[in-house]
Amino acid sequence: MYSRRVPRTVRASTEKRLLAAGRAAFARKGLAGTSLKADILEPAGVSVGSFYHRFTDKTDLLLAILRQHSEALRAALRDAHRPARGRTLVDIVRSSYAMVFRLAEENEDLLRIQLVERTSADPRVRQYLREDRARWIASLADDYRRLDSTRVRPGESAPRPLDADLLAELVVGLSLGCVAQLLELPRDERPSARARLLKGLVRFTLGGAAALAGEIALSVSPTQSGGAP
């Protein structure tokens, strides 16, 4: 009898084609507008049975695409935040933002999918994106706490602790907004806009971190802060 077992290389190739076809289709049409057969299976050259052997439905495929991208991006960000001899905090912040911009432009289709699907009709997608954002914030906050601990030098008193969770939440929101703004521009206008945004983000983040730690005195009236006058 012939073995029914499919070689591992064939299985990997099939899944790779499905991920690529799904990524292209979801970027063009969104989850709701994508036809599983016409937009994914036919371009990938994969049968219906082979698809359902790997994924439960097209939403499951979309989540696999988003998961793959997010994990790779978080790994790259951890590398960008890793302290090294001779690297200042300014260097680390600048390199992390520069990396975010670079990866966003290299994966423009995936960023557009994420921006569009935040209001997806499928609750699984909305839940995944909410949880993924929370994971981003938690991971970034851990990095900020680690970097904040390096500010203490021998013989110096410890600075006021940084609200790393709040800073991470603000930075994630700010980064997504700036990335979306950059991707809206024609490609020939992006280099100058990227340089301007990068410079502003570095200053804003470092100044904001100092303010959150109480190292910069801010005078805000109750009315300005949203409290009762």
Image (cartoon, rainbow, N blue to C red):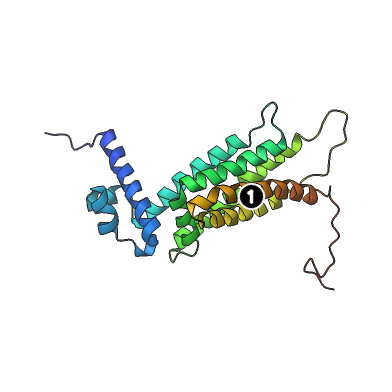
Pick the residue in front: 218 or 178: 178
- Please state the horizontal and vertical placement of residue 213, each as a whole percent of the image: 80, 48
Q: Is residue 146 visible?
A: no
Along the viewing direction, whichever of 194 and 152 lies nearer the viewer: 194
Q: Is residue 215 above or below residue 117?
A: above
Query: Is residue 32 in view?
Result: yes
Q: Residue at x 63, y 55 (%)?
A: 174
Q: Nearer the viewer, residue 86 or 166?
A: 86
Q: Residue at position x 57%, y 54% from top? A: 176
Quadrant (top left, top right, bottom left, bottom right) of the C terminus: bottom right
Amino acid tagged 1 = Arg
The residue at which mark 1 appears reads as 196
Tell me: 222 left or right of 45. right
Place residue 10 in its image quadrant: top left
| Outermost residue, top side | 85
Q: Is residue 225 above or below residue 132?
A: below
Mark 1, residues whose alpha carbon is within 10 Å: few (<14), some, or many (≥20)?
Answer: few
x 33%, y 61%: residue: 34
Question: As rendered, which of 108 and 83 lies closer to the eye?
Answer: 108
Q: Residue 133 at what x, y percent from top left?
A: 56, 53
Q: Residue 201 at what x, y percent from top left?
A: 67, 49
